[in-house]
Image: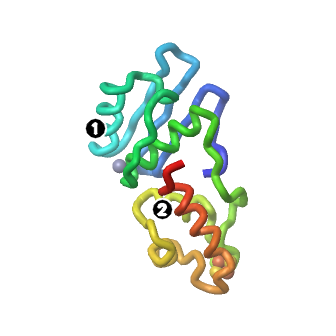
Amino acid sequence: MADEKITNSIHRAELKGRDLIEVDLASSPPRLKVIGCADLLALVRAIQTQHGVQPGQWPLPKGTSHSELLVKELILRVQGKWKFPYEHLELCHCRRVETEVVDQAIIAGAHRPEEVSRQTSASTACGTCRPDVEKIIQFRLGSS
Ligand code: FES
Ligand SMILES: [Zn+2]
């Protein structure tokens, strides 16, 4: 989502109520907190084993599972390359759907606009917001 940096040293990515990955760069080595499913824990453990404890030096995961999308977000945040493509709080004005709700649905697996609409009711009226939904899907799933 937009910018959830808490301080300059703490970066996090989360699927609210399910998975959280957070790193504090102020401590050395960086303090990493991972809370969530076995999938996320296993992914982070595997990456750490192979690439070390500095999230800024991890390769971006190529897959699109929720765990991979969260790790990718964390890495990009740490690197200062997190550029979320939509900056307003509310994304769909007809249905009053917040950007965060759409983004979280995408992380959780709604990877096509139709799925996002079904799950969040975003872009089910005038359709003006649909390009923004598509932009966020592209941003989350794209290779950047
Ligand atoms: S603004 Fe989303 S459907 Fe109209
Ligand atoms: Zn999970």
User: Which residue is the extreme one toward the bottom?
Assistant: 125
Q: Is residue 134 above or below residue 52?
A: below
Quarter holding residue 11: top right
Q: Which mark is residue 106?
A: 2
Instruction: Specify the amino acid type for callout 2.
Output: Ile
Instruction: Specify the amino acid type for callout 1.
Output: Ala
Residue closest to the eye, 68 or 37: 68
Relative side of 3 to 57, left or right: right
Number of marks drawn? 2
Percent x, y of residue 39: 29, 45
Quarter holding residue 134: bottom right
Relative side of 27 to 66, left or right: right
Secondary structure beneath dot 1 equals helix
Q: Residue at x 53, y 63 (%)?
A: 137
Q: Residue at x 57, y 83 (%)?
A: 124
Dot 2 surroundings within 10 Å: few (below 14), some, or many (20 or more)? Answer: many
Q: Residue at x 44, y 35 (%)?
A: 59
Percent x, y of residue 88: 72, 60
Secondary structure beneath dot 2 equals helix
CB at disc 2 and ligand 2 closer than 8 Å:
no
User: Which residue is the extreme one toward the top?
Assistant: 28
Relative side of 14 to 90, left or right: left
The first of marks 1 and 2 along the sequence is: 1
Percent x, y of residue 100: 59, 59
Q: Is residue 45 above or below residue 93?
A: above
Q: Disc 1 marks which residue? A: 42
